[in-house]
Image: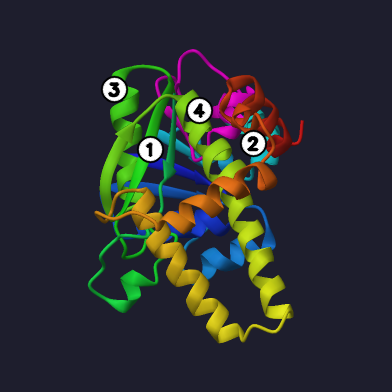
Amino acid sequence: MIKIALVGAGGKMGCRLTDNFLQFPQYDVRYLEVSERGCENLAQRGVSVTDPASALPDADVVILALPDVALGKLSAEFIPMMKPGAVVLTLDPAAPLDGVIYHRDDLGYVIAHPCHPSVFNWEPTEEAFRDFYGGISAKQSIVVALMHGTEAHYALGEQVAKDMYQPIKDVHRITLEQMAILEPAMVETLAQTCMEVVKEGYDRIVALGVPEAAARDFVLGHLRIQIAVLFREVNGTFSDAAYKISKRAKPILFREGWQKIFELDDIREQVKDITGR
């Protein structure tokens, strides 16, 4: 039986992982939480909180489901308690890339992050269709990286990640640097920012008098087909007029050289903002 210590088990991400681990009897999971709200979340699930001093030294895998700004300090507190050969499993590349995770040469370090269900997932039920984050009933893929350690460390980290993020579509093994290119650079620095601007535009047209129901249907419907065309989900193209207006708009909306956000030096600056250093 694999022994796991889930640190931050009562938080937003920790609760999702807790819910899944409760379905897997092959894991002996100890749940670590300090916040009052987090402990209440665990109590609602019938889960008892374990003291770090009794949970960490015996764990095969220690999962740090903690905010990026807290990972440096708390990893320095918890990782020294771990037994040699165990695996540190983190959920995001920012803190590992920034070098704030406490390091021991005798441990394995694996990072596993969910892709979340695709906008083109086909799900058979309303519950699965509405599982936007994944980890409940909608299939999602995950990306996994070995930051330090052996192939055995990676294999254990990947298996635990598949179970805690299940149901899984695909597992993509990538490097830590590639994961940081994906997040924060691609999906937060670029995609989320663009979507926030789209939402600001949506709010603006509603303020200008476009009926909100019409604006919502029109914008979301066009976003879906635009994504489908660009990512080749359909054998189609935009109209000539649409290509012309896009060509006109790009230099207005985007500063020249914006692609530098994918360069590693810039990504390191992005993760420093995330970790609070």
- Numbered range of the magenta stretch: 79-108
Mark 1 closeness class: few <14, some 14–19, many ≥20 residues within 10 Å: many
Return the residue at label 3.
152
Query: What residue appears at the point 39 percent right and 72 percent down from the top-left corner?
Result: 130
Label 4 to label 1: alpha-carbon separation: 25 Å
Disc 2 secondary structure class: helix
**Residue nearest the observer in this picture, 139 or 100:** 139
Query: Looking at the image, is mark 4 or mark 3 earlier in the sequence?
Result: 4
Report if residue 88 lies within the magenta region: yes
Q: Nearer the viewer, mark 2 or mark 4?
A: 2
Q: Position of residue 47 (x, y in %)?
A: 47, 62
Quadrant placement of the C terminus: top right
Return the residue at label 4.
82
What amino acid type should be assigned to the residue bearing mark 3? Ala
- Residue 21 visible in image: no
Label 4 to label 3: alpha-carbon separation: 17 Å
Which picture quadrant has residue 103? top right
Disc 1 secondary structure class: strand
